Amino acid sequence: MQNSRIKSFLNRIISASYLHSAVLLFQILVGNLKNFTYVIGDEAAKVGIIIDPSWDLDKVMSTVRRNKLDIKYIFNTHSHWDHTIGNKEIANRTGAKIIAHESAPTLKDISARDNDVIEVGSLKFKVFHTPGHCLDSICLMIDEILFTGDTLFVGDCGRTDLPGCSPAQLYDSFTEKILKLDDHTRIYAGHDYGARLRSTLGYEKKHNRSLQPQSKQEFIEIMSR
Ligand SMILES: [Fe+2]
Protein backbone atom coordinates (compact mmCIF):
# COMPACT_ATOMS: atom_id res chain seq x y z
CA MET A 1 0.00 0.00 0.00
CA GLN A 2 1.40 3.36 -0.94
CA ASN A 3 1.57 6.21 1.53
CA SER A 4 -0.39 8.43 -0.80
CA ARG A 5 -3.38 6.19 -0.40
CA ILE A 6 -3.89 7.36 3.15
CA LYS A 7 -5.79 10.52 3.74
CA SER A 8 -6.37 11.76 7.24
CA PHE A 9 -8.87 14.19 8.66
CA LEU A 10 -9.13 16.06 11.86
CA ASN A 11 -12.50 16.06 13.46
CA ARG A 12 -13.09 19.69 12.69
CA ILE A 13 -12.93 19.01 8.95
CA ILE A 14 -14.69 15.71 9.01
CA SER A 15 -17.35 16.93 6.61
CA ALA A 16 -14.81 17.91 3.97
CA SER A 17 -14.63 16.09 0.66
CA TYR A 18 -12.41 13.03 0.75
CA LEU A 19 -13.87 10.79 -1.89
CA HIS A 20 -10.65 10.07 -3.72
CA SER A 21 -8.77 8.52 -0.84
CA ALA A 22 -8.52 4.75 -0.62
CA VAL A 23 -7.76 4.63 3.09
CA LEU A 24 -9.55 6.98 5.42
CA LEU A 25 -8.22 8.06 8.79
CA PHE A 26 -10.17 10.22 11.18
CA GLN A 27 -8.60 11.61 14.34
CA ILE A 28 -11.44 12.58 16.65
CA LEU A 29 -10.94 14.54 19.85
CA VAL A 30 -13.31 13.23 22.54
CA GLY A 31 -14.16 13.70 26.19
CA ASN A 32 -12.65 15.87 28.90
CA LEU A 33 -9.22 14.26 29.04
CA LYS A 34 -8.23 15.15 25.50
CA ASN A 35 -8.50 11.55 24.29
CA PHE A 36 -8.26 10.72 20.63
CA THR A 37 -10.52 8.10 19.10
CA TYR A 38 -9.56 6.97 15.62
CA VAL A 39 -11.70 5.66 12.79
CA ILE A 40 -9.78 4.01 9.95
CA GLY A 41 -11.54 2.68 6.89
CA ASP A 42 -10.95 0.96 3.58
CA GLU A 43 -13.05 3.18 1.40
CA ALA A 44 -13.45 0.70 -1.44
CA ALA A 45 -14.41 -2.26 0.73
CA LYS A 46 -16.43 -0.05 3.11
CA VAL A 47 -14.97 -1.75 6.16
CA GLY A 48 -13.05 -0.26 9.04
CA ILE A 49 -11.98 -0.24 12.64
CA ILE A 50 -12.22 2.06 15.63
CA ILE A 51 -9.33 2.60 18.04
CA ASP A 52 -10.06 3.42 21.68
CA PRO A 53 -13.73 4.41 21.78
CA SER A 54 -14.45 6.25 24.99
CA TRP A 55 -16.60 9.39 25.00
CA ASP A 56 -18.63 11.26 22.36
CA LEU A 57 -19.70 8.02 20.73
CA ASP A 58 -22.37 9.73 18.65
CA LYS A 59 -19.65 11.86 17.11
CA VAL A 60 -17.63 8.75 16.34
CA MET A 61 -20.63 6.90 14.93
CA SER A 62 -21.62 9.83 12.74
CA THR A 63 -18.21 9.53 11.09
CA VAL A 64 -18.76 5.81 10.63
CA ARG A 65 -22.21 6.31 9.11
CA ARG A 66 -21.17 9.18 6.89
CA ASN A 67 -18.54 6.95 5.33
CA LYS A 68 -20.79 3.91 5.24
CA LEU A 69 -18.19 1.83 7.05
CA ASP A 70 -18.91 -1.61 8.41
CA ILE A 71 -16.82 -1.59 11.59
CA LYS A 72 -15.23 -5.01 12.05
CA TYR A 73 -13.01 -4.43 15.06
CA ILE A 74 -12.53 -2.22 18.07
CA PHE A 75 -8.87 -2.00 19.04
CA ASN A 76 -7.84 -0.95 22.53
CA THR A 77 -4.31 0.40 22.80
CA HIS A 78 -4.44 -0.51 26.50
CA SER A 79 -6.94 -1.28 29.23
CA HIS A 80 -7.19 2.07 31.00
CA TRP A 81 -10.80 3.14 31.39
CA ASP A 82 -10.49 6.34 29.39
CA HIS A 83 -9.65 4.23 26.32
CA THR A 84 -12.16 1.46 26.79
CA ILE A 85 -15.40 2.77 28.31
CA GLY A 86 -17.04 3.03 24.91
CA ASN A 87 -16.26 -0.57 23.94
CA LYS A 88 -19.57 -2.13 24.86
CA GLU A 89 -21.78 0.51 23.28
CA ILE A 90 -19.78 0.62 20.05
CA ALA A 91 -19.75 -3.18 19.89
CA ASN A 92 -23.53 -3.22 20.36
CA ARG A 93 -24.07 -0.55 17.73
CA THR A 94 -21.75 -2.03 15.10
CA GLY A 95 -21.33 -5.73 15.86
CA ALA A 96 -17.56 -5.21 15.96
CA LYS A 97 -15.26 -7.57 17.83
CA ILE A 98 -13.04 -6.13 20.55
CA ILE A 99 -9.29 -6.72 20.20
CA ALA A 100 -6.83 -6.07 23.01
CA HIS A 101 -3.50 -7.48 24.10
CA GLU A 102 -3.74 -10.96 25.55
CA SER A 103 -2.74 -9.64 28.98
CA ALA A 104 -5.49 -7.00 29.10
CA PRO A 105 -7.99 -7.63 31.92
CA THR A 106 -10.81 -5.91 30.05
CA LEU A 107 -13.49 -7.80 28.12
CA LYS A 108 -12.30 -8.74 24.64
CA ASP A 109 -13.26 -11.07 21.83
CA ILE A 110 -9.78 -11.50 20.35
CA SER A 111 -6.42 -11.55 22.13
CA ALA A 112 -3.61 -9.86 20.26
CA ARG A 113 0.06 -10.74 20.58
CA ASP A 114 3.25 -9.03 19.56
CA ASN A 115 3.76 -9.06 15.78
CA ASP A 116 0.21 -10.17 15.02
CA VAL A 117 -1.17 -8.74 11.79
CA ILE A 118 -4.91 -8.17 11.64
CA GLU A 119 -6.47 -7.61 8.23
CA VAL A 120 -9.60 -5.59 7.52
CA GLY A 121 -10.35 -5.31 3.82
CA SER A 122 -7.05 -4.21 2.29
CA LEU A 123 -5.87 -2.74 5.59
CA LYS A 124 -3.19 -4.56 7.56
CA PHE A 125 -2.63 -3.59 11.18
CA LYS A 126 0.56 -4.83 12.84
CA VAL A 127 0.60 -5.18 16.61
CA PHE A 128 3.58 -4.09 18.68
CA HIS A 129 3.41 -5.06 22.33
CA THR A 130 4.87 -2.03 24.10
CA PRO A 131 4.51 -2.47 27.88
CA GLY A 132 5.55 0.32 30.20
CA HIS A 133 2.68 2.74 30.62
CA CYS A 134 0.53 -0.37 31.00
CA LEU A 135 1.48 -4.04 30.89
CA ASP A 136 -1.03 -4.59 28.09
CA SER A 137 -0.09 -1.53 26.01
CA ILE A 138 0.12 -2.06 22.29
CA CYS A 139 0.95 0.19 19.37
CA LEU A 140 -0.73 -0.43 16.03
CA MET A 141 0.93 0.19 12.70
CA ILE A 142 -0.69 0.56 9.31
CA ASP A 143 1.71 1.47 6.54
CA GLU A 144 3.84 4.31 7.91
CA ILE A 145 1.38 5.34 10.62
CA LEU A 146 1.84 4.26 14.23
CA PHE A 147 -0.99 4.60 16.74
CA THR A 148 0.81 4.83 20.03
CA GLY A 149 -1.95 5.07 22.63
CA ASP A 150 -0.40 6.29 25.88
CA THR A 151 2.99 4.75 25.15
CA LEU A 152 4.19 7.82 23.28
CA PHE A 153 2.70 11.29 23.06
CA VAL A 154 3.76 14.22 20.95
CA GLY A 155 6.59 15.64 23.07
CA ASP A 156 6.32 13.20 25.94
CA CYS A 157 5.36 9.68 26.97
CA GLY A 158 2.72 8.07 29.14
CA ARG A 159 3.11 8.14 32.91
CA THR A 160 4.74 5.20 34.63
CA ASP A 161 3.74 5.81 38.24
CA LEU A 162 0.41 3.98 38.19
CA PRO A 163 -0.16 0.36 39.21
CA GLY A 164 1.03 -1.93 36.42
CA CYS A 165 3.36 0.71 35.02
CA SER A 166 7.06 0.10 34.57
CA PRO A 167 9.57 2.72 33.40
CA ALA A 168 12.09 -0.06 32.74
CA GLN A 169 9.62 -1.82 30.43
CA LEU A 170 8.79 1.47 28.71
CA TYR A 171 12.49 2.07 28.06
CA ASP A 172 12.76 -1.38 26.50
CA SER A 173 9.64 -0.77 24.39
CA PHE A 174 11.20 2.41 23.05
CA THR A 175 14.66 1.01 22.38
CA GLU A 176 13.66 -2.42 21.12
CA LYS A 177 10.53 -1.53 19.14
CA ILE A 178 9.63 2.09 18.44
CA LEU A 179 13.09 3.57 17.91
CA LYS A 180 13.82 0.88 15.34
CA LEU A 181 11.07 2.19 13.07
CA ASP A 182 11.73 4.57 10.19
CA ASP A 183 12.05 8.26 11.04
CA HIS A 184 9.22 9.00 8.64
CA THR A 185 6.81 7.00 10.77
CA ARG A 186 3.85 9.21 11.60
CA ILE A 187 2.84 9.28 15.24
CA TYR A 188 -0.82 9.41 16.25
CA ALA A 189 -1.11 9.33 20.03
CA GLY A 190 -3.89 8.50 22.45
CA HIS A 191 -4.24 12.02 23.81
CA ASP A 192 -3.92 15.56 22.53
CA TYR A 193 -1.16 16.44 24.99
CA GLY A 194 1.44 17.90 22.65
CA ALA A 195 2.06 21.10 20.79
CA ARG A 196 0.79 19.43 17.63
CA LEU A 197 -1.97 16.97 16.85
CA ARG A 198 0.43 14.44 15.36
CA SER A 199 4.10 14.10 14.66
CA THR A 200 6.79 11.97 13.09
CA LEU A 201 9.21 9.66 14.82
CA GLY A 202 12.12 11.64 13.40
CA TYR A 203 10.82 14.87 14.94
CA GLU A 204 10.13 13.15 18.25
CA LYS A 205 13.64 11.70 18.32
CA LYS A 206 14.93 15.28 18.30
CA HIS A 207 12.39 16.92 20.58
CA ASN A 208 10.76 14.31 22.83
CA ARG A 209 12.57 13.92 26.16
CA SER A 210 11.50 10.28 26.34
CA LEU A 211 13.39 9.34 23.20
CA GLN A 212 16.69 11.07 23.86
CA PRO A 213 19.84 8.92 24.00
CA GLN A 214 20.08 7.81 27.61
CA SER A 215 20.71 4.74 29.70
CA LYS A 216 17.86 2.76 31.18
CA GLN A 217 18.82 4.00 34.64
CA GLU A 218 18.79 7.61 33.48
CA PHE A 219 15.37 7.10 31.92
CA ILE A 220 14.01 5.51 35.10
CA GLU A 221 15.33 8.42 37.18
CA ILE A 222 13.74 10.99 34.86
CA MET A 223 10.42 9.19 34.97
CA SER A 224 10.45 9.12 38.77
CA ARG A 225 10.75 12.89 39.13
FE1 LIG B 1 -3.45 5.24 29.91
Image (spheres, rainbow, N blue to C red):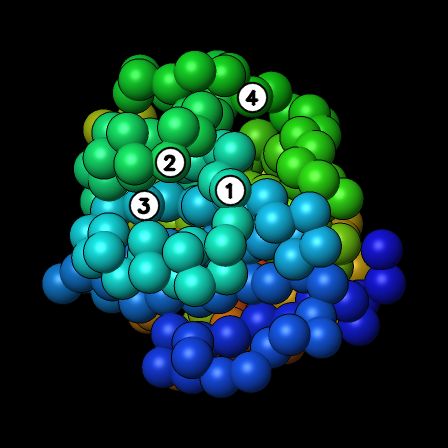
Q: Which corner quadrant of the image does residue 120 belong to?
A: top right
Disc 2 residue type (three-letter):
Thr
Residue ID at (42%, 55%) = 64
Q: Nearer the N terminus, badge 2 or badge 4?
A: 2
Residue 94: which numbered mark, if any? 2
| Residue 93 visible, this angle | yes
Disc 3 residue type (three-letter):
Pro
Q: Which residue is mark 1?
A: 70
Closer to the camera, 143 or 204? 143
Quick check: 5 left or right of 134? right
Disc 1 residue type (three-letter):
Asp
Viewport quadrant of the C terminus: bottom left
**CA distance separating discs 2 and 4:** 20 Å
Quick check: 214 left or right of 135? right
Query: Badges 1 and 3: C-beta atoms under 8 Å apart?
Result: no
Between circles 3 and 4, the one closer to the viewer is 3
Q: Nearer the N terminus, badge 1 or badge 2?
A: 1
Residue ID at (48%, 40%) = 71
Query: Badges 1 and 2: C-beta atoms under 8 Å apart?
Result: yes
**CA distance separating discs 3 and 4:** 18 Å
On screen, residue 130 above or below 98: below
Q: Nearer the N terminus, badge 2 or badge 3?
A: 3
Q: Nearer the N terminus, badge 3 or badge 4?
A: 3
Q: Which residue is mark 4?
A: 112
Q: Secondary structure at mark 4?
A: strand
Residue ID at (33%, 31%) = 91
